[in-house]
Each structure stands twice: as structure tokens, then as C-alpha cells.
Amino acid sequence: MNRTDMETRIDYYPTHEHDGYRFRRGHTLPFGATIVPNGVNFSVFSSSATSCTLALFRRHEPEPFVEIDFPPEFRIGDVYSMIVFDLDYEELEYGYRFDGPFDPDAGHRFDRTKIVMDPYARVVGGRDVWREQPDWTNLYPHRSRLAFDDFDWEGDRPIETPIQDLVIYEMHVRGFTAQPLARVSAPGTFAAIREKIPYLKEIGVNCIELLPIFEFDEWENSRRHPDTGELLLNYWGYSTLGFFAPKAGYAATGRFGMQVDELKTLIKELHQNGIEVILDVVFNHTAEGDHRGPTISFRGIDNRTYYMLTPGGYYYNFSGCGNTLNCNHPVVRNMVLDCLRYWAAEYHVDGFRFDLASILGRDQNGAPLSNPPLLESLAYDPVLSKCKLIAEAWDAGGMYQVGSFPAYGRWAEWNGKYRDTIRKFIKGDLGLVGEIATRIQGSPDLYYYRGPTASINFITCHDGFTLWDLVSYNGKHNEANGEYNNDGSNDNESWNCGWEGESADPAVHALRMRQVKNALAILLLSRGVPMILMGDEIGRTQYGNNNSYCLDNEISWMDWGLENRNAELLRFTSLMVRFRRAHSTLRKNWFYEHRDRVGSGKPDISFHGTEVWRPDFSPGSRTLAFLLCGKHGEPPHGDIYVAMNTYWDGLPFRLPDAGGGNVWKVAVNTSMPSPQDIYELPDAPRLENQDEVIVGGRSVVVLVSDRA
Amino acid sequence: MTVQVSEQNNITRVALTGSLDGKTAPQVREEIRPALEKSMQVILDMSGVDYLSSAGLRLLLLAYREFTAKKGKLVLLGVSQDIQAVMSHTGFLNFFKLAATEQEALEAFK
């Protein structure tokens, strides 16, 4: 109780009573449940309901202990609000019953028999412990709960690392430490990531991007594999129940309802270590599915407002998941804004990656908008102004906007074209050298007016093969998903290096290792923002599964045994990240200009081939070299010469002069065995023949100019 | 929840038994207040606490901060492994001085 507030406010006294519970008219805003002196303020919107009832539960009790109808005078506009006094914040669960028409043709699906969840619930109860068998007889399985919003941040705030300096690590909260070999106190949790911060620092990444952490139901569409009997779950979590609530099952303390504190503690400690946090957010659909799905929240509160509906009242399905959130409806747009502001302000989140973001640019009938108000609002929002905004610039309804996503000078994109081009080039496809030259520059063909930092460069992500599988499998092997290998992409641009799957052949293994290093080297030498998939730094395999959305097992989990077995890859990745950090020309937020801007006598970038000044852009070419003038860096550094050869045999590349009395030193040579594959810069050995370097078959060589 | 206060050699010992949560926190706050007001050295014996909720953690932190602000020394004694884990995961552990044994607690005052 806050005595001062009680004494100074003239309106915090009950005016009504029902079954011994005392209440009064509440505050219309903010939406959701807010702790106020002596009570809780409840506020919820519905434009079409005829009445609303607040249902209060004791935690885990099957039925509410009291239901209080909102008196008519408690509604202002379309918002019902009420303060209820003397509640036990920690033990309280709540929901609403809405009365209104059930008229699907007109878009209404009210159901008074259901108690629905608050869209603004900051904690959601019901799935408190990951994978704990739910009580299937529970009529109200997902309960809204209250959150304590006080937290001692000790001076922390979002880091605001310039986006061009980021190296993103995309990871799954549970998958990162679920394996026993992770050796953490609470496997699969926020707390466990905290224990692994030293590992993240060893790789050198300065940003983690978490697969969805908004409360979802891992049991949604759960089933047994028809052959193996393995339990299949919604492991990835791209199906939101509550946009304001962190996933309880990802918190070691979720069973005590302390997930808010646990996640904030993780973020605070990551920030103390210079690591940003980006959340993968799913605003394109909800967990309620189509007309056959359950009524959990939005459908029962204001179906017509929250969802895009066909003229007959069915659900548009631009998400591929049954429904589509109506995010350019002004009310829904505000909810999305409130939500992101909440995560940025209350959790100090550094940025967001928007799943199927093109949906956010559709109007209420699904038609693409030329000036989508939601995207514009996000780009200009005062709270979000320093947040990274990253779009997955396509949707399941056929919109593909890589390069054309409405950016307002703010938005970056997952560059799917970068992924596809690099994959094809690495496996030796022809006709790509010209495109490779644009991709390593940050894709000026796509982002000329936006700069290279609009391009999130990645070769692998959660969706698709891991990097190791990209060089170990020609085709997907998704049998474990129980859909007879019909799910997942068939378009992988992968090459198995001569044997499908695991191989004991040392030559195959060595080639795969080299191909993985080639990929990591090219990724970390490209302008734009590199993103590494969890485990790619140690050669994690999913045994050819390119769509592990339902697998909560070793296939999806990080294999910490590889930390030792593939220590050479970890070393390679980590030194490559450090190489990027040491060379500012690789990290600019403007494009190379192909001219000498600083009087060094060299353009900032120049392209070469096996002959100096003669890049081979012919359709049959498998070579490309480029020279970056280090004097164009801020701070300046030595020149960088990169030679890529995707031909199967070694080729001699004639070298430009290192200039100024300098010599070429070998920083990276992926055809050499570890530890000669990459050097810490002071140890880089002088290249023997300064006129020419032999670049091994399917290899990348990086030279740096340095004093003799 | 019971609160027992005793004093020996200028050291006040507050023993809590039961669950410290949203229900009991206001009562505990009232009952430990006099001890914290008059003493400068306090051992908060938590060995009888079987559950510590969010509200309980917040009460402890507020009391601790208030007490150390007036240059008092407060040590938590006998916090169970389970509760320590929760305190660690939620970031509260860093804020407190903990002692496993009586001896250790007394050392902290020297």
C-alpha cells in the first residue's frame, strides 16, 4: 500500500460492492491491468460487445472466485474500466466475458461461455513450465496475470550500437542450452543464456536475436510422430498468445511467475557485456487459427477489429497460419505500437525483427498499401527511435519486398537475395560473379537509396538448413517432423560435397569444413549487417532437417559437444568476427564509391580476377578478387585483398602491389589446415611470393598489407 | 509466517519462518520495522523460509536498501539452495550479503 497516494488522491475508495468485493469506476487508460494504490485497474476495449464481465481467479483454480459485471457507467467510448480493491496481486488471475452477437457473416464471434485473455496481459499463466503436461479439462487454460514493473536497472538502457557494427547471433532460448552438455543450472531458460554470456563473447557477437519469446503455447497442434511416437510441439513459437508477456516456460522461475524479472536480469547483464537484444516478433497472426480455432482472446473480444476478414466473415490467411492480424486497423496498430514501446521501455530491448513483415503493409482487406500507416508509425515513433527495426520482407500471401519494403529511412531487411546468391556461389554455380560483387558491397542494387545497413546479410537462419547441413545435404530430410518430408523448403541451394549426410571420409569432411569457412569469411567480409545462426560457429547439424519448428530435441538443440570437436571452426569464426571489428571499411553505413576519396591513390574498392584489374564477370567464371583501401577506413588500417575461388582446383591470382613499402600478409586461407587457416593479425605471416598467391580449390584467401 | 526477534551482543537476529509472499509481506514489514530502526547489525535468519515470491523479494530488497542507507549491516543467513537459485535467476542475489553459517554471518560484521 502506498500511503501517500491514498492520502493525496480523493478518488481511491470503493463505490460498489459485489459478493464482498469492492470496486469503483477505473481509469480508461492504460489498457490492461495496472497495480494502483490498494487495488488493480482493469481496462479493456471492445467495439461491438454489448456487455463485459471481469472474472477473477485464484491462481490455478478451475473457476473464478468472483465475476463482476461492468456497470454501464464504467464504459467510456468502447473501453470498459474498473478498479477492484484488496486483491492479492501475486495469486490473481483474470479474464473477461464478453456478450455480443455471434454472427460470423458480419464478423462477430462473441461467446459468453468463454473467459478470454486480456490482449494487454503482461504475464500469462497456464504454461508456466515448458512442456509440462497441461490439464486438458481446464476450460480457461490461458489466464491473464499481473506483473510487478519495478526493476532495478542500475543505470542500464538500450545500448544503441551503430547498426553497421553489429554481428547478430540468431538463437532459440530453449535450444541454446537445453542439451545436458550445456552444463547450466537451469537448461533452456533465460537464466541459462546469462550463464553462457562468456561463450557469446568468445564468438565475438554483440547482438543476440531471440526467436519468439512472447507467450505462446508449445502444445498448440501438438501431436505424436506417426512412426516414432516422438512428441511434436510448437517449438519455435511463431504463434503468439500474449504480445506483452514473456514466455513463462523460458524462465527458470516461470513456475513462480517471475519471468519478467528473469528476462530483465538477462537483458541487463547482456548489456553490461556489450551485447544487444533483438526480439523476433510475430504480429502477422495469433494463436487462434481460423474459424475452427479456439477462442482465447481477440476472437472473443472484437473479432472484426483484430482480424482481416473476408466479405463472408472468414479469415484471410496471408500468414499461412490460419488468420491475419488486422494490423493497419487503427486500434490494432496502436496495440502493436504500445507493445513495442513496452518492450523497448520496460525491457530495454534494442530492436525487433518482424516475422512476415510484409503483412504489416497490407490494408484491412489485404491489399498492399503504398504508405502503410503502421510501418510509418513505427519508423517515426519517439520511444522506438533508436531501436533496430528489421523486416522479414515477404509474407505467405505472395508479397515479396526484398529491396522495396517501405523503409522510411529506418527499416532494415533480411536480405534473402544475399542468402541465395552466396549459397549458389559457394557451391560452384556459374554466372554469379557479377551478383556476388554487388552482394559483398551490401547489395546496392537493392538498397541504393538506403545504404548497406538496410541489408541484414545471412546465409543461414532458423528457417532452413544450418550451415553445416548446407554443405552436407543436397536435399531436406524432414521425416522427424511427421509430415513425410513434405514440409520445409525444397529450394535450398545446398551441396553435400559428395556424400549425402554424415561422412567418415576425411576428404569429404575437410571439404565441408572449408566450405563452411568460405561462407563465414564471405559473410563477415561483406558490407551490411552479418547474422550468424546459433551453432554455425561450431558446425551444428540438424541431420538434414530444414524445418525443425516442431522438434524439441537434439535435432534442434545446440550440441555443446561440438565446442571441443569443432574447436577449429569456433576459432575461425571468432577470429573472423575480430577481423571485421578491426577493419572499419567493412562496416560503413554507406556504399563503396569506386573512387579515391582520401588521396590514397586507390579507390575504396576495386575488383580483380586472377589478373590484377581484370575481374572475370563472364558466365563461366568462378573467381573474384577485391581490394579494399584501408586508408578509406575510420580509423584507417591496412589494405585488404580478398580472393575467392569456387573452382575445384587451385588457381594463381596475380596480386596488386601492397604499396608504400608494405608487404602482403596472410590473414585467412581456408584451404590450409587449422591453425594456419586464420591468424590473429599480429601473427599473420608474410606472403612468400608478393606477386602472386595460389588460392586453393573452393577457397578464400584474405591478405592484409602491413609494414615489412 | 512467524517473525522472531532476539538480540545478543548488539546484534539483532530476526528469524522468519514460513512463506514470504504477497500475503505475508505487509505483516513481515511491520514486524521487522522496529528491529531495523533501532539496530545497526542485523542477521535475517531465512533458514525457516520455504518460499519467497516476487513480492517477498521486493520487500527484502527495500528493507535491505533502507537499512544499508543508514549504514547498517544486514546479512541473510541460511537461505535455502532453491531460494538462492530463484534469487540468482531474477537478479536479486547480487544485491544482498549472504551467509551460510552463523559464524560466517558474525564475520561479516567485523
Image (cartoon, coloured by chain):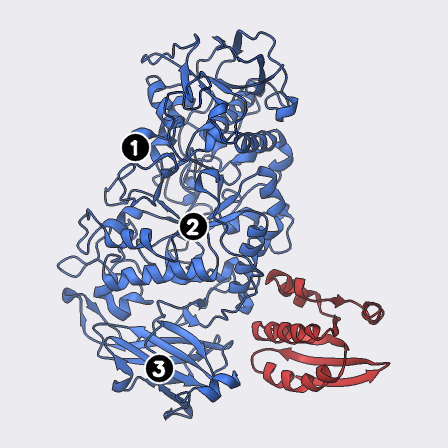
Chain colours: A blue, B red
Say which chain tag 3 marks: A
Say which chain tag 2 marks: A
The relative height of residue B96 versus residue A327 in the rendered view (above or below) is below
| Residue identifier under label 2 | A351
Element type at mark 3: loop
Q: Earlier in the sequence, mark 2 or mark 3?
A: 3
| Number of the label disc, if any, that sits on residue A446 | 1
Q: Callout 1, which amino acid?
A: Leu
Residue at the limit of the structure toward the front, as seen here = A599
Q: Residues within 10 Å of mark 2 (few under 14, many from 20)?
A: many
| Number of the label disc, if any, that sits on residue A26 | 3
Say which chain tag 1 marks: A
Q: Position of residue A155 (x, y in %)?
A: 56, 59
Q: Is residue A424 visible?
A: yes
Q: Callout 2, which amino acid?
A: Gly
Q: Callout 3, which amino acid?
A: Gly
